[in-house]
Image (tube, rainbow, N blue to C red):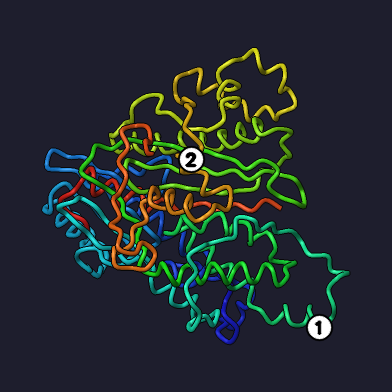
Amino acid sequence: MEQPKGFEEPGKETWVWMLQKGLYGMKQVGRIWNKMMNKAMISWGFTCLACESCIYYRRRDSGIVIVAVHVDDFLSAAHLPQENTAFRAQMKTIWNILDLGKARFCVGITISHDRLARTVSLSQTALIDRIITQSSQQDTYPAKMLMDPGLKLRRPDPSKMTTHDKAELAKFPYRLLIGCLLYLSVALRPDITYAVQQLSQFLDSYSYMHWNAAIQIVCYLKGTWELKLVLGSTNPISLVRFTDSDWANCLDTRRSVGGYAFTLGSGVISWATWKQKTVASSSCEAEYMAAFECGKEAIWLQTLLSGIDFTPAASTPILCDNNAAINLSEDPSLHQQVKHIDIKFHFLCKHIHSGDLKLSYVNTHDNIANIFTKALDTTKFEKLHLFLGLVLKPTTWFHSRRSVAMPRWGGVLRSGQYTVTKSNNMFFYFFLLSFLYLPDSLS
């Protein structure tokens, strides 16, 4: 590194220092730490997953240990408590560590456990409180509806805005609010993902309509403050995938919005909402391109599960509510009619024909991914809201006097500029797998 000003060696002012160890705050420190940590983990018998470099896995005759790493924060789940103890002892031989015991709080996420039900509940009430305070909504009433189904957002015309309006809008912390909501949506609140994705397209040009829509999300969060994402169950693990799109959703570009959701039999573990990069000429094309993105995530998830010796059943279906897209993915003869679609999207057909993936039909009213592609009315929203694994206490206003039961799936659900909002799934996978696959010790 260059010599700090005022500490140069006389006569060697142009020389540089060679570091003996990494210094905190330097841009190289993160990489140096990661290399040292990875070397230690490998020496202890762990395998770093090729598809997710922050997860380490070790299987020995004495038990199994899965470790998730976030910079220098470690979460470990073991088949037996003794394995966790042994792992911590190995860490102490190299580093000075702070053992916090049973996992209750990590990277802003509050963790609670129910070992009898084999579930883990995750929440971020502190962040919601901060958002409510920063947006000055402490005294407002909570909103039951997240976004008006009839609301259509588009970029405002600057020529029609007065100087006074521009000055007043500049006072609103719109970008700050959307940034906070974005973090919350990708971490623990899949129910607000679509609304946040829509509003995040207008960070450089917004109006009172956009600000009011953002405040409505805050009021909705105020009413669902105690909402928790519940993962796990006593049922066997079953990878279920949903995909959907809303054709020509964007009024400015006429591009479609795509979305998907993944579960392992309980709450969602991976979800995403995005504006597609090209204009689809039909709803079939829009659904086909959304299924392509879902297929990529499905293959990654299958690789992750296989990396910890839990290979899912072959050809787990991707549930889609468009028969034309399903036929297109299975029948090569139809491709003469869709030659204009980018060749990369036919990646989906390749994996369907090889048996890695399978598109299956699900009724649009039962398609969880609907909540990620459009603003729904209250009845539909509440129904799909529960299927996400988001649970409130029965005493709260949102589900007044009505107990909430988690849905169970036996493979298929049964019941009467390019903005992307995507879940940060590493910790979800770790928590869920640790409680369904390694239920005995989490620290």
Residue 41 seen by the camera:
no
Q: Position of residue 219 (x, y in %)?
A: 50, 72
| Nearer-the-camera pick, 62 or 312 | 312
Q: Is 109 placed left or right of 149 in the picture?
A: left
* Helix, strand or loop for disc 1: helix
- Residue at (14, 57) in percent of width and height: 85
Q: Is residue 60 left or right of residue 144?
A: left
Label 2 residue SS: helix
What is the three-letter code of the residue carrying label 1?
Answer: His
- Using residue 59 as the reference point, say whether residue 410 is left or right of it: right
Which mark is first along the chain, 2 or 1? 1
Residue at (61% x, 14% y) in the render: 332
Q: Please say if the residues under marks 1 and 2 sit with CB atoms less than 8 Å apart.
A: no
The mark closer to the camera, 1 or 2, is 2
Q: What residue is drawn where x is 36% and y is 61%?
A: 399
Q: Nearer the viewer, residue 247 or 35?
A: 247
Residue found 69% across the figure and 56% down from its top: 152
Residue 365 numbered mark, or none = 2
Q: Which mark is residue 327?
A: none
Count residues near mark 2 (Cα–Cα under 10 Å), then give few for <14, some for 14-19, many for 20+: few
Q: Whole-Å distance between the Cαs marked 1 and 2? A: 45 Å
Where residue 299 appears, as percent x and y from the top left, is 46, 33
Residue 261 location (% of width, % of height): 46, 43
